[in-house]
Amino acid sequence: ALSDFNRALELDNTMSWAFYFCALTYFQKRKFKNTIKDIDYSIALEKTLKNQDIIMKKGCCHSLMGDHESAIMDFREAIELKEDFASAFVGRGETYRRMGNLKAALADFNQAIMLDKNVDSAYSCRSEAYLQMGALQNALDDINQAVLLDPEDDWSYYIRSLVYTKIKYPDGMKQDLEKAIKIATGEYNKRTNDWLYTLNLALYYLMGGNLDKAEQFYQKGLTCEIQQGSFYKATSDLDYLLRLFPNHAAAQTMLSRLQDRFKELIRKAVPDS
């Protein structure tokens, strides 16, 4: 489909709908820079294409690439377009959480849940915030609700494994990590170039103590689409883990390796002047 849209744009680069559908396709492929560019092109050509869903996708792209200020503006705009847009409140709240503004994050998660009690991501993201705050019972209650709403989400099992680690329940931690790995492996096998599941698996194996597997998946995850958000995801996930467990030696070592690896990839990508 993407090749068809691109061919159409080669014939006529004023076709707003082609940019619009390219953006949606890029978003599915987690090519976030391309998504943002084509969203902007499509709206510039045809103002009626601007809606809360496409603006929220733009916000998600900015957030997942670490451009928090742009993400906040996007989510705010999406909420202005649709005041009861629960998912946009979740997106903005998660961005605030990544910025360290836990008060604002909790306010947005609470608002999302008030608008729609069935948005599982609101509970899982709020659980992460509570976990940062040391509110372990709240974190456990929320992540249990997230798992109940979507029992096939690998990330929720990972977050619950962190809660179980904090409350010293090793059997639960092991079971949830195994579940997270099983689900993520299934998704990875369907699309081996999807850096999100590649990096999720790297993180899960690292948490489980399988450092060789973790290294393997990190190397692959950072080889593809380093400018599209994969490096930010890898390092921010490790940063979060180290906030919870500052003495986690494997996470410290891996974070240092990834930073060195990223610098090396950037040097190779940018020719000497």
Image (tube, rainbow, N blue to C red):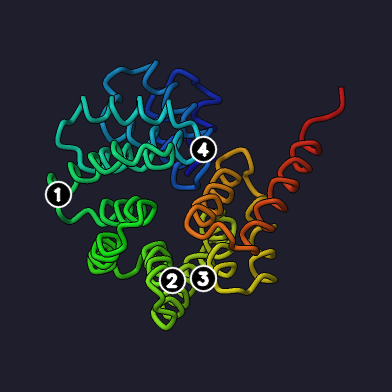
Asked whether 26 or 201 is in front, the reply is 201
77 lies left or right of 205: left
Q: Amino acid at mark 4?
A: Met
Q: Position of residue 245 (x, y in %)?
A: 52, 60
Residue at image position (23%, 40%) is 107
Q: Quadrant of the C terminus?
A: top right
| Nearer-N-terminus badge (2/1) | 1
Foreground disc of the pair 3, 2:
2
| Nearer-N-terminus badge (4/2) | 4
Q: Amino acid at mark 3?
A: Thr
Q: Which residue is mark 4?
A: 65
Quarter of image, res 183: bottom left
Label 3 CA crowd tier, 10 Å (few <14, some 14–19, many 20+): some
Residue at image position (44%, 80%) is 170
- The circle on residue 116 is 1
Separation of marks 4 and 2 at Cα, in angstroms: 28 Å
Q: Amino acid at mark 1?
A: Asp
29 lies left or right of 153: right
Helix, strand, or loop for circle 4?
Answer: loop
Q: Position of residue 51 (x, y in %)?
A: 26, 28
Contact, mark 3 vs mark 2 (Cβ under 8 Å): no
Q: Position of residue 72 (x, y in %)?
A: 36, 29
Label 1 CA crowd tier, 10 Å (few <14, some 14–19, many 20+): some
Foreground disc of the pair 3, 1:
1
Residue reaching furthest to the bottom: 171
Q: Which residue is mark 3?
A: 185
207 lies left or right of 110: right
Q: Which residue is mark 2?
A: 165
